[in-house]
Image (cartoon, rainbow, N blue to C red):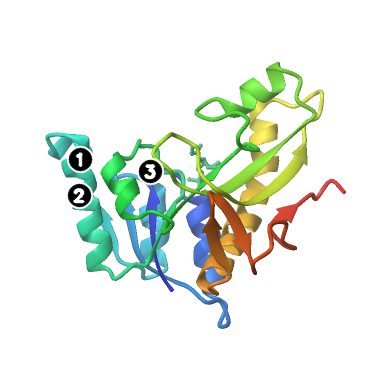
Amino acid sequence: MKLAVLVSGRGSNLQALIDACAAEDYPAEIALVLSNKADAYGLERARQADIPTAVLSHKDFADRESFDEAMSAKIEEAGAELVCLAGFMRLLSDGFVRKWRDRLINIHPSLLPAYKGLHVHERAIEEGARFSGCTVHFVRPAMDEGPIISQAVVPVHPTDTPDDLAARILEQEHVIYPRAVKFIAEGRVRVSAERVLINDHAVPDGAMSNPAG
Ligand code: GAR
């Protein structure tokens, strides 16, 4: 399955996907890395792996819709069948989300539906959450909403700074994102009544990860 990965910055989740795709038996390959920022380090990671890149600046477009249409054109040109948001920090238009429905996934550093949006780690620590984690989900028009494919849980320690917690969660993001993409590329994932079934099961092995035991 051909992937388009959309990044705005560091691209460590992109790197996890690049590394996964390097394995001979991995059922996906990255056909395009697209960024809205010319200086995103993710673009450098793509170049180093000989993956085609594209940069589209939203500043060159009159509105969100025309920017998103240009992104869709690039993604289609590359022949991508699945769009993976990997730290892509722009809201998407309803039209884009509709066009790529059930072919557009995101990774978010919290246990959705808790802590949507930004500053998730600060908020989890401030509110005394004992656990946090990360979520891979299909994208719907509302931000950080949509059928959940995979989640991993990590503990929140009393002494954690937001950076400590972010690092603990990021490690798990790098595990569950390539795994979720693998499940999709193998054709094992479907959405039914806005719930994800993997191998036709609602609570599949491998889609949940609780490294804390
Ligand atoms: C990741 O932690 C990802 O979950 C988060 O941005 C970071 C990107 O890091 N995404 C969101 O907050 C989306 N709402 P990366 O560029 O190193 O992959």
Q: Position of residue 133 (x, y in %)?
A: 68, 40
Left or right, residue 157 beside residue 167: right
Are discs 2 and 1 less than 8 Å apart at CB? yes
Residue bearing the label numbered 1 = 65
Residue bearing the label numbered 3 = 8
Residue drawn 34% across the image and 55% down it: 100
Residue drawn 36% across the image and 70% down it: 50
Q: Amino acid at mark 3?
A: Ser
Cα distance, mark 1 to mark 3? 18 Å
**Placement of the N terminus among the 4 image quadrants:** bottom left
Residue drawn 33% across the image and 40% down it: 92
Q: Position of residue 153 (x, y in %)?
A: 74, 43
Are discs 3 and 2 less than 8 Å apart at CB? no
Q: Position of residue 26 (x, y in %)?
A: 56, 76
Q: Is residue 35 visible?
A: no
**Is residue 160 shown above or below 108?**
above
Q: Residues within 10 Å of mark 2 (few under 14, many from 20)?
A: some
Left or right, residue 156 beside residue 149: right
Which sits in the foreground, 98 or 69? 98
- Circle number at residue 119: none
Q: Is mark 3 within 8 Å of ligand 1?
A: yes
Cα distance, mark 3 to mark 2? 18 Å
Residue bearing the label numbered 2 = 69
Which image quarter: residue 188?
bottom right
Q: Secondary structure at mark 3?
A: loop
Q: Secondary structure at mark 1?
A: helix
- Which of the marked residues, 3 or 2, is nearer the chain's N terminus? 3
